[in-house]
Image: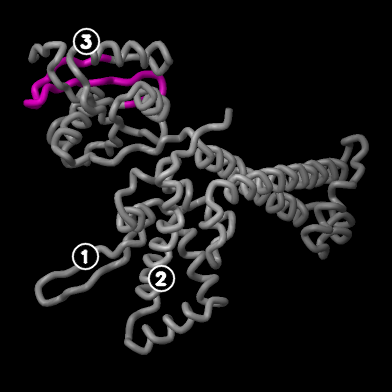
């Protein structure tokens, strides 16, 4: 264990978990200075920062899981003037070679920062984009629950007593939900009464979720239009796709150094797949898949309604390029447009409402 002086620069790596974080500090020669475990509470974060300052001068913190377990710690450190770097988990080959433990993972995080393998600043999570992300999570779960409710209602109707099934089976979905919600089961003394109660419960659940989704969608539309009006105004994007792209960029899109970085983040950049005399690129299957899906939806809209995009498709097909590669090129072009629309946000850090 090396002994650091109060003025000696150190790099700290943190392995994050739900209830505790494990930190490992290295000096500038990569020697171990100390290891510490703290609870995931405000007091624990303060103790961790005081511990690091007692070992030396922290020049950077490599934190795992800045979008999940490490989010609160990353925000605390940034608020206290610390440099925070997002670190990925060690790859499986390194874990097989060195073993797996929390101190080892924390040390790997510190070494990744020192080696320059981890250089990306985490999302700030302190402004309107974080508000959009939270509401999108709530709406997505409500949409899934609504789908489950209507599927269960229709499946239950298949095995319902004949008189009930014949009454409701041919109704459109909206009419079926309204009719089932108005059913009066009475005392539960027969399979028919039980089926009536079950159908009414599922229908009213579907109606309640519909109201939730409408309320959340209205708030999301308002926040997205306020956060990035230029992005929403682009052809074929709209509020929903804009929200997914904003969440991918984060509250601090200045952390993205170029439009190529944003394209890589969205999984729309070309990946080299060349070997020998073959020179080609392949599709990128990494990145934020929700942002990638948003780009795909935008491409589909433009291929149908945007004449320049339709002309581009015709020209590239005539050149012999496969359609999936053409779509990848279009997603890359749209990522460039989106990054340009995000430029005002790169110069104006969004702050939380007071």
Locate residue 53: give its quadrant: top left
Residue found 28% across the figure and 20% down from its top:
22
| Location of residue 242 with respect to 306 vertically, above or below | above
Q: Nearer the viewer, mark 1 or mark 3?
A: 3
Looking at the picture, tell me which residue is in the foreground, 273 or 184.
273
Locate the N terminus and report the quarter of the image it occupies: top left
Apparent side of residue 214 relative to residue 193 in the rendered image (left or right): left
For the residue carrying disc 3, how many other residues have a C-alpha within 10 Å: few (<14), some (14-19), or many (20+)?
A: some
For the residue carrying disc 1, how many other residues have a C-alpha within 10 Å: few (<14), some (14-19), or many (20+)?
A: few
Q: Secondary structure at mark 2?
A: helix
Q: Which residue is mark 1?
A: 272
Locate the C terminus and report the quarter of the image it occupies: top right
Q: Secondary structure at mark 3?
A: helix
Q: Position of residue 25 (x, y in %)?
A: 18, 20
Q: Secondary structure at mark 1?
A: strand
Q: Which residues are magenta?
A: 16-36
Q: CA distance from mark 1 to mark 3?
A: 46 Å
Q: Which residue is mark 3?
A: 54
Locate residue 10: give its quadrant: top left
Residue found 34% across the figure and 57% down from its top:
259
Looking at the picture, tell me which residue is in the foreground, 68 or 332.
332
- Mark closer to the chain start, 3 or 2: 3
Q: CA distance from mark 3 to mark 2?
A: 52 Å
The disc at residue 330 is 2
């Amino acid at each position: 264990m090396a002994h650091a002086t109060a003025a000696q620069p150190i790099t700290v790596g943190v392995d994050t978990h739900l209830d505790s974080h494990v930190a490992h500090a290295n000096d500038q020669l990569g020697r171990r200075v100390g290891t510490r475990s703290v609870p995931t509470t405000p007091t624990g974060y303060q103790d961790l920062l005081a511990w690091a300052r007692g070992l030396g001068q922290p020049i950077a913190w490599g934190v795992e899981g800045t979008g999940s377990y490490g989010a609160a710690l990353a925000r605390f450190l940034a608020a206290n003037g610390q440099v925070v770097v997002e670190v990925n988990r060690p790859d499986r080959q390194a874990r097989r070679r060195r073993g797996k433990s929390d101190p080892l993972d924390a040390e790997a995080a510190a070494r990744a920062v020192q080696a320059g393998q981890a250089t990306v600043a985490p999302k700030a999570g302190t402004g309107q984009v974080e508000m959009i992300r939270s509401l999108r999570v709530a709406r997505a779960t409500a949409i899934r629950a609504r789908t489950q409710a209507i599927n269960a209602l229709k499946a239950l109707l298949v095995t319902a007593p004949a008189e009930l099934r014949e009454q409701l089976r041919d109704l459109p979905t909206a009419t079926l939900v309204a009719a089932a919600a108005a059913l009066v089961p009475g005392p539960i003394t027969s399979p028919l009464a039980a089926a009536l109660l079950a159908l009414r419960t599922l229908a009213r659940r579907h109606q309640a979720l519909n109201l939730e989704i409408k309320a959340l969608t209205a708030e999301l539309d308002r926040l997205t239009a306020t956060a990035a009006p230029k992005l929403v105004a682009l052809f074929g994007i709209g509020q929903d796709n804009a929200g997914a792209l904003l969440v991918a960029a984060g509250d601090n899109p200045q952390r993205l150094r170029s439009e190529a970085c944003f394209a890589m983040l969205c999984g729309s950049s070309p990946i080299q797949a060349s070997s020998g005399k073959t020179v080609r690129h392949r599709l990128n299957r990494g990145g934020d898949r929700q942002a990638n899906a948003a780009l795909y939806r935008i491409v589909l809209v433009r291929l149908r309604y945007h004449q320049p995009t339709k002309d581009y498709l015709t020209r590239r097909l005539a050149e012999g390029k496969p359609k999936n590669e053409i779509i990848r090129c279009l997603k890359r072009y749209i990522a460039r447009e989106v990054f340009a629309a995000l430029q005002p946000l790169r110069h104006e850090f969004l702050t939380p409402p007071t």
